[in-house]
Amino acid sequence: MKYVDEYRDGARAREIAAVIGAEVQPGRRYNIMDFCGGHTHSIARFGLEDLLPPSVRLIHGPGCPVCVLPTGRIDSAIELARRPDVILCSYGDMLRVPGSGRDSLLKAKADGAAVRIVYSTLDALKVARQNPDKTVVFFAIGFETTTPPSALALLQAHAEGLENFALFCNHVMTPPAMRAILTSEERVPLEGVIGPGHVSVITGSQVYQPFAEQWQLPIVISGFEPLDLLQAILMLVRQVNNGRAEVENQYARALQQDGNPKARQVIEQVFTLRPSFEWRGFGALPDSALSIRPEFAAFDAEARFALPYRSVPDHKACACAEIVRGLKRPQDCRIFGTACTPDHPVGSCMVSSEGACAAHWAYGRFRDQQQGAAQ
Amino acid sequence: MKLDWVSGRVELTHGGGGRAMARLVDELFKSAFSNPLLDAGNDQATFTVPAGRMVMTTDGYVIHPLFFPGGDIGSLAVHGTVNDVAMGGARPLYLSAGFILEEGFPLADLKRIVASMAAASAEAGVPIVTGDTKVVERGKADGVFITTAGIGVVYDGVEVSSDRARPGDVIIVSGTIGDHGVAILSVREGLEFDSEIRSDSMALHRLVETMVQVAPGLRVLRDPTRGGVAATLNELAQASAVGMELDEAALPIRPQVRGACELLGLDPLYVANEGKLLCICPPEDADRLLAAMRAHPQGQDAAIIGQVVADDHRFVTMATSFGGRRVVDWLAGEQLPRIC
Amino acid sequence: MCLAVPAQVVALLPDGMATVDVAGVKKDVSVALVDGLAVGDYVILHVGYALNRIDADEAARTLALLAEIGQLDEARQELLDGGAA
């Protein structure tokens, strides 16, 4: 596959890893946080941590939109799905995420609710056209990468007069998440950040400049293939060693400094900032999420249906809140692998394929056993 | 009362045991599957029990959509059941087929499915010797459900079982993985895409016959259907109380299957196969067995994909192409397409 | 979040759509977010929408850089070995 295989060359990966190993300075720490679930997933899937020297520690941040969506919003989606007059269309990622009382969209589907997995909002529009007697609600989640498709779908519905289509908007933004991490009183010390690749295709790279400056933090935007990530980590190590704190773009083949202005314009046209939105792990953050503009209220599920928001605290033993902030690793969670497994997940970090817990369970937990055995 | 094969539909009377049902059974099932045992016209097939150890298997087919690139529920039912017998290290002898039909199901579609089953059965040389038909009310079945049973005789000197894998054994797959699951997805609503990928649904008993001749000491045979290679290897690791180490670079995967999996965020290791088998054999038999498989039309893309190791935790792990290592987990449920 | 895959445009369609190819698998997707696409261009495809064009020159440059990283280290290693011997 072009533009994929070349960036998965194993021999080249080992070379770059060796260079990283040679360039890390003894006694120096390199804590690097990623802000993109796609990076979390790639790192785990390709076993990249095995190649890195111990002083480079990869910490997973709140870049997984499934993981940061609070239980109360999932409950609202399930409530919508259970309405007999609604067909809820959703990306596959959300189906197994537990809401209150271990309910989920998948369970609702088993109970007879009309829940459909779609690959794209384009498919949700098709469902709406094919089912004029139902309200087809699209469960919109995601950071800036996934927001333009929701915006375009709403504009298309508006243009067509597709009145039975509505969007349940849960789009969130990356810079507020970054700010929340960096301003928390309790936080893990960081030497560098791997910037989200596809979010930056939309936002451009300048949005991270204030963070690099204010916190003297090197930020390198990275692609998703193993060589991209290794190169980005090398670039961060070099910045740290040279005392620089700049925003660099490793993913130059896919993004320009200015991002995609057309995509941002479409987002601006349809959405507006919510004054406040609750994030799992951070509580309510101001100006961190989007809602649909009043002129499009006809396509806003929150305007059409009464969906009172009930904030639901995480299960007492669930450590998702600390995990999305990088304060705990999955293996530090009391219930990881015992009460909380992919079979019966307690929190969203275990369900989302790019949640740190799911990634660790799926790809990395054998290391815990080996380390345990070694002791 | 005459059956309209063009635009007719299944009615409740077709399952009622009366003349309407007899007509359906005669004109459709018996004429398509015709063989001496079936033609005797009894509710049971009578035959002499062959010498040796026998295997018996049963299966249910509830797949949706019913028709997909490379097959349909009918051919799948025959291939799947024949394969389950063959995976016991046995020569398949006979099949049974039970049909649960939904009221309103188009007779044209039923005829197509039955013809497909008959063709698959004839090609495999394994006759359907007994069957049953029931009709349920509209909404109580997804068009048609098919249940089967199959019996066979174990080849002399062969003993295969899921608990026989030993550290040092070699793991071989008979060909490319993920074809069937991707073919199904390509026609499933909400996920459609255009590709040339066809289901690999196929009866593998002739390949198995060659394999047991070349390496009668082989230890495990299993076809990686639902849940893919990952699920099957995890099951075997548990049953044999061993670990397994795979080599990612050695997995045979068609480029289009890779492309489709990348597109939908799926891992080919977890995608269903219906015309492939996994074999675990003693290391001294591996090269000879691989050569014999590759020389066989059903095993041309066969490859050694890993080895069995001692591991109390029974992990299935995989070396990535970078010297990294990851677990190949046993998923809780079906793999879902993802955006993240 | 960001499962996106490089896809090649094989046909432009009306209404801001296009047929793209991923390793032989074809799908009709929206290209409304990317202007001036031509058949043969590669795009980043995410949930049925092209997000941006892939710049072939930048891709080549990245690959060249990646290749260089290893070589520089070899060259440096040779120097070190030469010095030590």
Image (cartoon, coloured by chain):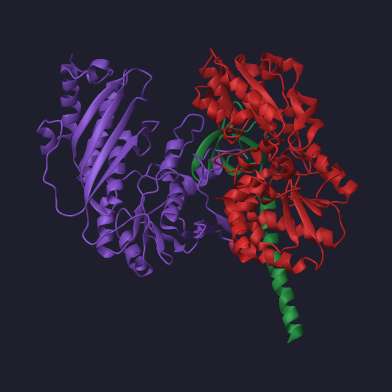
Residue B47 vs A119, above or below: the answer is below
Of A225 and B34, which appears nearest the observer? B34
Q: Furthest-right residue in view?
A: A214
- Residue A270 showing in the rendered view: yes
A44 w.r.t. A68: above or below: below
Give the chain coloured red.
A
Asked if residue B147 lies left or right of residue C78, the reply is: left
**Chain B representation colour:** purple
- Whole-percent x, y for residue A354 in the image: 63, 44
Chain ID, green in image: C
- Residue B321 location, x and y as percent? 56, 60
Image-based side of B21 in relation to B324, left or right: left
- Residue, x 57% and y 28% (percent of image)? A105
Q: Residue at x 83, y 59 (%)?
A: A240
Q: Quadrant of residue A119?
A: top right
In the image, C55 versus B160, the foreground residue is B160
Image side of residue C14 versus residue B80, left or right: right
Which residue lies at the image location 65% right of the left edge and 30% below the top edge?
C32
List x then y, in percent, for residue A248: 79, 51
